[in-house]
Image (cartoon, helix red, strand yellow):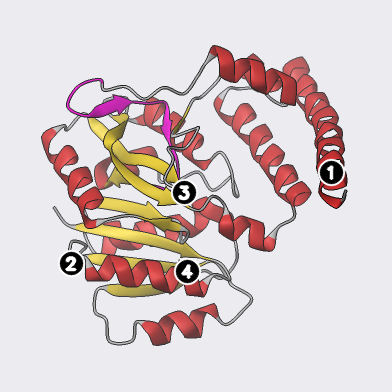
């Protein structure tokens, strides 16, 4: 099977170049596509110079920054349709993965055709396993409650993230974390690629819901014995404030709930009210945190 990797860059050329160099030196990828999401710095010339003459690395420039889904789709379509890649991987610039992880993903796809998307377990930068190594997709009413900090804590106690082996080292999950994962070309095309109605959040859940709807013969699986490191949201934090990020998150939440859970009428009004209250709650929590830091 031909394998390809997409790395989405936005004003983060240094990390992107390091990641792509490491990936190219593994000699397991047939093509690596760097998609620049309309960076406002000198990312494009820096990346172009870094990989001049490297045949397996391709640079695509997006005319505008449409977010995670739109930027990655540009690279995914190129790898699927122009490079004929069978397995397509997506990696954020702030991750570290090994050749063994890619080998394990490809071998699992070969052995278990029922899986349309696979990914390793996410570790934090200090090596500990992430508290959310995969994603759960709550129902619509739960989604409203999860706007609030207190309900979040209660929900997580009732629905803890537990790693288990469903057989052959794979755990079936609702959705994979989007920082490093892989998808079959067939699954990607049937699902209609990533949903570009999102910007920075809910892309993974949206894609999982598309798989359920458009190609239910496929499942998403977590390789419980394979790992990668993620410096969480390093790129996001470098360009967005916490409140800006929170607002974008909630905008994506409204899109997801109305598109995939069919929220309408009273339910949608309750969601918007919950978001308004939780935004105020977020400001208070951040203020308290900053006050403690200053003291």
In the rendered structure, find residue 292 and report the number of the disc placed on it. Answer: 1
Magenta residues, as a range?
166-180
- CA distance for labels 2 and 1: 49 Å
Location of residue 46 in the rendering, given as x and y in whole percent from the top left corner: 48, 83
Is 121 left or right of 9, judged from the image as shown? left
Alpha-carbon neighbours of circle 3 within 10 Å: few (<14), some, or many (≥20)?
few
Q: Are marks 4 and 3 in contact (CB under 8 Å)?
A: no
Q: Earlier in the sequence, mark 2 or mark 1?
A: 2
Q: Earlier in the sequence, mark 4 or mark 3?
A: 4
Residue designated by label 2: 27
Check disc 4 and report its element: helix, strand or loop.
helix
Residue designated by label 4: 15
Q: Earlier in the sequence, mark 3 or mark 1?
A: 3
Location of residue 182 in the rendering, given as x and y in whole percent from the top left corner: 31, 46
Q: Residue at x 36, y 58 (%)?
A: 77
Front residue of this view, candidates 257 and 93: 93
Is 264 left or right of 15, judged from the image as shown? right
The answer to whether residue 199 is visible is: yes
Check disc 2 and report its element: helix, strand or loop.
loop
Alpha-carbon neighbours of circle 1 within 10 Å: few (<14), some, or many (≥20)?
few
């Amino acid at each position: 099977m031909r394998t390809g990797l997409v790395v989405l860059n936005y004003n983060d050329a240094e990390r992107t170049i390091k990641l792509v160099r490491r990936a190219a030196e593994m000699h397991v990828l047939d093509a690596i596509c760097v998609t620049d999401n309309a960076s406002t710095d000198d990312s494009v010339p820096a990346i172009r110079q870094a990989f001049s003459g490297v045949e397996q690395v391709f640079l695509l420039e997006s005319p505008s920054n449409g977010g995670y889904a739109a930027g990655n789709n540009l690279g995914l379509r190129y790898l699927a349709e122009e490079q004929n890649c069978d397995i397509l991987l997506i990696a954020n610039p702030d991750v570290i993965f090994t050749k063994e992880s890619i080998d394990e993903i490809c071998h699992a796809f070969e052995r278990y055709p029922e899986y349309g998307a696979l990914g390793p377990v996410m570790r934090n930068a200090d090596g500990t396993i992430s508290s959310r190594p995969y994603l759960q997709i709550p129902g619509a009413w739960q989604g409203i409650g999860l706007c609030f900090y207190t309900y979040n804590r209660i929900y997580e106690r009732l629905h803890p993230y537990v790693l288990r082996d469903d057989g052959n080292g794979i755990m079936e999950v609702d959705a994979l974390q989007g920082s490093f994962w892989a998808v079959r070309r067939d699954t990607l095309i049937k699902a209609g690629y990533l949903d570009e109605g999102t910007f920075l959040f809910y892309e993974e859940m949206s894609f999982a819901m598309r798989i359920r709807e458009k190609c239910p013969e496929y499942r998403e699986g977590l390789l419980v014995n394979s790992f990668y490191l993620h410096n969480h949201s390093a790129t996001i934090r470098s360009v967005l404030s916490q409140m800006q990020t929170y607002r974008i998150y909630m905008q994506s939440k409204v899109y997801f709930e109305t598109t995939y859970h069919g929220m309408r009428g009273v339910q949608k009004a309750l969601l918007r009210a919950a978001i308004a209250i939780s935004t105020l709650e977020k400001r208070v929590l951040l203020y308290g945190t900053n006050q403690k830091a200053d003291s």
